[in-house]
Amino acid sequence: MKFVSPVTAPGAPSFALLQRVGGRNAALLLFALILSIPAMLIAESDGKWLHRVPDEDRARANPFATQPQATAAGKVLFSENCAKCHGADANGLHNRPSLRSERIRHASDGELAWMLKNGNPYKGMPPWSSLPEQQRWQIIAYLRTLPPAHTAGK
């Protein structure tokens, strides 16, 4: 019986390679692939997503950065959309990262906007492209008002 590989997304691993290798070598290759998954997940959690942000997105400025009303609206939007994973205080919940970390604080507004729009599927961050762009910028304006993690009270 010949195994027929299902259609996969571009770049996704295919079982065709395992068919060509065959037998014990296929098992070893599969084992190596399985062992590499945690390394890929760790790489994504350490800020590697920043390298995927296109330069034109990285350079974008928050049009609401200096507007107190936008910050207030961002706080409400954060509570409604982000707090369930990142915590009401943005210090992170359920193995989700703190949004008060140095990495987030040093990311440009454009990088954060890109992350909100595209998400990070390797770490369970959904894309928030369904939120209007204005609301995503308001969330970023709110995040910029939060103190660093080490001074934030819980």
Image: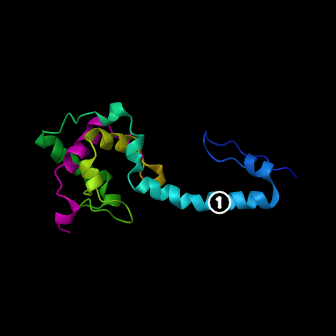
Q: Residue placed at 37% from the left, 61% from the top?
A: 96
Q: Quadrant of residue 117?
A: top left
- Quarter of the image for the C terminus: give it: bottom left
Q: What residue appears at the point 62 percent right and 60 percent down from the top-left corner?
A: 34
> Left of 2 or right of it: where is 147?
left
Residue extending farthest right: 1
Q: Foreground residue, 110 or 80?
A: 110
Q: Is residue 99 above or below residue 135?
A: below
Residue 132 spot, x, y in % from top left: 32, 36
Q: Which residue is mark 1?
A: 32
**Vertical placement of 5 versus 154: above or below?**
above
Counting every numbered tag in the picture gives 1
Quadrant of the image occupied by residue 51: top left
Query: Residue 145 colored magenta?
Result: yes
Q: Looking at numbered disc 1 in the image, what kind of residue is underneath it?
A: Ala
Q: Range of the magenta residues?
A: 127-154
Tell me residue 109's x, y (percent): 26, 41
Quarter where residue 11 is shown: top right
Query: Can residue 152 be seen?
Result: no
SS class, disc 1: helix
Image colouring = rainbow
- Residue occupying the far bottom of the picture: 154
Instruction: State the residue in front, 142 or 55.
Output: 55
For residue 114, side relative to residue 34 (left or right): left
Q: Locate residue 35, reporting x and y percent.
A: 60, 62
Res 71 visible:
yes
- Reply above or below: 20 against 89: above
Counting from the top left corner in percent of width and height, residue 75 is at: 21, 50
In percent of the image, x 51 and y 59: which residue is there? 39
Question: Neighbour class for label 1 at 10 Å: few (<14), some, many (≥20)?
Answer: few
